Image: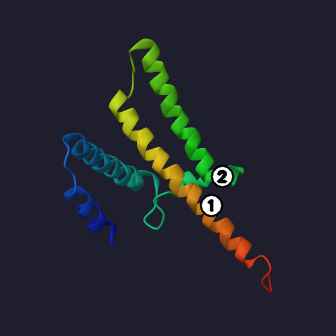
Amino acid sequence: MAVEDRFRTLCEGISHPKSGEFAELLCDVLELHLKKSSDYGVPGDPLLNLRCSSEYGIDPWLATAIRANDKTTRLKSFARTGVLENEGVEDTLLDLSAYMLLVLILFREKADNKDEATRHAGAPGR
């Protein structure tokens, strides 16, 4: 099932206002991801900026988790002071949500690549 159809089907099953709010936030995170991908990625790889950490020997999923930690640090600062100078709490939370999904994507990608390498490790010519 295409992702659009899956999302539509799931949204049709929403029966509580908070679940509807959750779905709206998922849309907000997707919109944020698409906008930022156009700034940071390239058409063939919207996650290119996150993958570049491998040039420094850091797995992209881990580098992205560190970026998410920066957002958590910002929230801790807000919890202590009640003030954020450059980005609001809601923007920080949406960014953090997007980062964590990106961590999962990149983590799965690494696991898939490792599985692929393991499958071919004993193949002739490798």
Residue 106's quadrant in the figure?
bottom right
Q: Residue furthest top?
A: 81
| Foreground residue among 113 and 86 | 113
Contact between labelled residues 2 and 1, with CB atoms less than 8 Å apart: yes
Amino acid type assigned to the residue bearing label 1 in the image: Lys
Instruction: Judge from the rendering whether residue 107 lies leftward or rightward of residue 19; answer left or right.
Output: right
Label 1 sits on a secondary structure element that is helix
Quarter occupied by the C terminus? bottom right
Q: Please tell me how many numbered marks the rendered image carries.
A: 2
Q: CA distance from mark 1 to mark 2?
A: 8 Å
Q: Earlier in the sequence, mark 1 or mark 2?
A: 2
Q: Residue furthest bottom?
A: 124
Identify which residue is drawn at 56% across, 46% down.
Answer: 64
Identify which residue is drawn at 39% across, 14% down.
Answer: 82
User: Mark 1 — residue?
Assistant: 110
Other-residue count near label 2 (Cα within 10 Å), few / some / many at <14 / 14–19 / ≥20? some
Label 2 sits on a secondary structure element that is loop
User: Mark 2 — residue?
Assistant: 59
Q: Position of residue 90 (x, y in %)?
A: 33, 32
Instruction: Judge from the rendering whether residue 35 lies leftward or rightward of residue 24; answer left or right.
Output: right
Above or below, comparing residue 13 to residue 3 in the picture: above
Quarter occupied by the N terminus? bottom left
Q: Position of residue 7 (x, y in %)?
A: 28, 61
Residue 16's quadrant in the figure?
top left
Identify which residue is drawn at 24% across, 40% down.
Answer: 18
Above or below, comparing residue 9 to residue 31 in the picture: below
Disc 1 or disc 2, which is closer to the eye? Answer: 1
